[in-house]
Structure formats: structure tokens, C-alpha cells
Amino acid sequence: MFRWVFWLVIPALSACTGLQVSSDYDSGADFTVLRGYDWLAPAKTAPGAPGIACDQLEATRVREIVEAQLARKGYVRDRQHPDFLVACQLVVEDRVSVTHVNELYGYGPEWGNPYRRNIRHYSPQGEVAMVSEYRQGTLLLDILSAADRRLIWRGTATGEVYPGLNREARERRLREAVEQVLARFPPPKE
């Protein structure tokens, strides 16, 4: 019995990563002819541009992880005659989360007292607003047709950025994001 529970719980826990993954693609594109790829030269951005968070170390890590995942899927890097181009961008934005909680939601004053239950007592007496600031990171992976540089597939992974993570933990989080995004590439045949 324990073995069955173990094999059911482990995948469920590993799926609780806090990443929101999505993808979209051009339904007219033929993904079956794609074999070789190359990297699209990164767009020139001003140093310190707001939102851009891909420093050279992170960019190198993401490229290595993407190349490993594409190799597992049977794609090879072909700088001379690629079928598709890969572009990557990491964006970090400051976010604010506001949650309003009515004090009577759950445990209000004298909650549970059976002698004082009436409408007037439980009328809204106030709300508590909980505000939290956090950083949200988004990984964008684009696949473009090499012939005309037309976007044919885009995958994104969005999640909270934890600035206190060490290098190994950051790399694990990047690997997880890339794996989840590229699990959707190529899209299923219609």
C-alpha cells in the first residue's frame, strides 16, 4: 500500500512548483520538418533597461539548459543551415499583491459563540488589507522560422523570484522552467 501512495504523492509534489507555464503556436507551421536550430542574436537593449534581468551568467545557464533539452528531443545545433531559430529572454518585474480579508471571514470577534449569533453581530465590521511586494520573473522562449524569421512558437514560464537562492537553487529553478516550457514543444499535431 505504501508503495502506491509513494508513487502517487511524489509526482503531485513535484508538480507544485509555483510556475505558470503556457505556450502558443502558429497552427499553419509544419513542425515535423524542424531538425536543426541556431540561436537568434539577442536584441540590443540599453544597460540597466527596466525589467530586463538576463545577465551574462543567467543567459549562459539558460542557453545550456535549452540546448540540453532540445538535444533530448532530437534537435541539433546547425549554425550553417538551421531550420529554426531560438530566442530567449528573462524579465523580472516588481509586483504588489493585495488581499482583502473581512474580519468575519473565519475567526471574527467572538466567533463560535452560539449565544451571540445574529445578523447585526456578524455584519461587516471592517476589512484587513494584506499587502505584499514581490518580484515576478518570466522566461520567454521563442521559436522562429529560419527562412523568414517569423514567430511560430512561444513558451513562457512565470513565477516568483526568490533573491536569496544560492547559485545551485537558481539553476535548478531555471532548469525546471525550461523543462516545463519545452515539454510543450513541438505542439501536438492537429
Image (cartoon, helix red, strand yellow):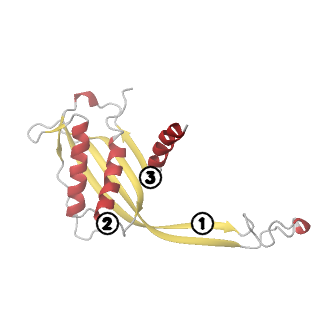
Three-letter code, disc 1: Thr
- Packing grade of label 1 (10 A; few <14, some 14-19, many >=20) is few
Residue 30 seen in the figure: no
State the residue position of label 3.
17
Give amino acid for label 3: Thr
* Relative image position of residue 112 (x, y in whole percent): 82, 65
- Point out the frontmost of discs 2 and 3: 2
Q: Is residue 164 above or below residue 75?
A: below
Which type of secondary structure does the marked residue at label 1 adopt?
strand
Disc 1 target residue: 99
Amino acid residing under circle 2:
Asn
SS under mark 2: loop
Q: Residue at x 31, y 66 (%)?
A: 166
**C-alpha distance separating marks 1 and 3:** 22 Å
Q: CA distance from mark 2 to mark 3?
A: 17 Å
* Numbered-mark total: 3
189 over 85 or under it: above or below: above
What's the CA distance linking mark 2 and mark 1?
A: 30 Å
Q: Which mark is residue 172?
A: none
Above/below status of 79 relative to 172: above
User: Residue beneath label 2, please?
Assistant: 166
Residue reaching furthest to the right? 115
Q: Is residue 187 above or below residue 105?
A: above
Between 179 and 186, the one nearer to me in the picture = 179
Q: Is residue 176 visible?
A: yes
Report which quarter residue 67 is drawn in: top left
Q: Quadrant of residue 45?
A: bottom left
Of the two numbered discs 2 and 3 on the same chain, state the one appearing first in sequence: 3
- The reply, left or right, for residue 118 in relation to residue 46 is right
